[in-house]
Amino acid sequence: MRILFPFCFLLFTLPSLTIQAQILDSENKLTITLKDQTKVTLYGQAATLSDEKSKNYYYLPCALRLSKKRDGTPEFLFMKFTSDEKSATGVTQGALLHLLMEYGLSKEQEVELAGVLKSRYNGALLKGAADVEPDGDNSVRIISSNKTGVKWTVWCRRTPPFLKKPTIKIMAKKWPIL
């Protein structure tokens, strides 16, 4: 009996827990150009068991740009180095790259987009940015103009989309520089 009660309790309370997920309808797509010429792609929220198109829209991340510090300095570092260590080819050389990228709309752009949606599309609502996941090794590529055979090792870390400034941190090292 003691084992049965927790099981029954869990069985009856589990359906009451709600899971928040964005399920978007690929057939309910809009593209809107803002005053500053930023093109924004939106997808409507999928309506369950219905052919009706939702008026709730989520926008895809856009406007990828180099992040800046409060004083306006870009969050970018490129450092070339030479090591005292000797390798088979002579002196070991390499480079480090670190940058921080931001994406998404500013508050002003979101307000403008919400207004355009409401006026042009019969009271449609902007629900915010769509949640997206990085695609592993295909998310970020660094293309170098140096000789072939020299590769960058890239690390990419994304902050959760619920933060005010969604960012991507990119760090890379290159061995050797020829």
Image (tube, rainbow, N blue to C red):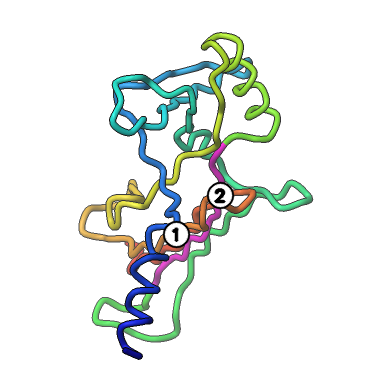
Residue occupying image coordinates x 48% and y 33%:
58
Residue that carries the numbered disc 1 in the rendered image: 17
Q: Tag 1, which secondary structure?
A: loop
Range of residues picked out in magenta: 93-104
Direction from residue 2 to residue 16 in the image, left or right: right
Image vertical order of residue 51 relative to residue 137, above or below: above
Residue that carries the numbered disc 2 in the rendered image: 166
Image vertical order of residue 120 relative to residue 168, above or below: above
Q: Which amino acid does label 1 sit on?
A: Leu
Residue occupying image coordinates x 52% and y 12%:
121
> Could you tell me residue 129's position as x and y percent?
51, 39
> Could you tell me residue 115's position as x and y percent?
64, 18
Direction from residue 46 to residue 83 in the image, left or right: right
Image vertical order of residue 128 relative to residue 112, above or below: below
User: How would you rate the neighbour count of disc 1 (Cα within 10 Å): few for under 14, some for 14-19, many for 20 or more?
Assistant: few
Marked residue nearer the N-terminal end (2 or 1): 1
Residue occupying image coordinates x 55% and y 38%:
104
- Structural distance between the alpha carbons of marks 2 and 1: 28 Å
> Could you tell me residue 7's position as x and y percent?
32, 78
Quadrant assignment for the C terminus: bottom left
Does 88 appear in magenta?
no
In this rendered view, identify the residue nearer to me: 107 or 50. 50
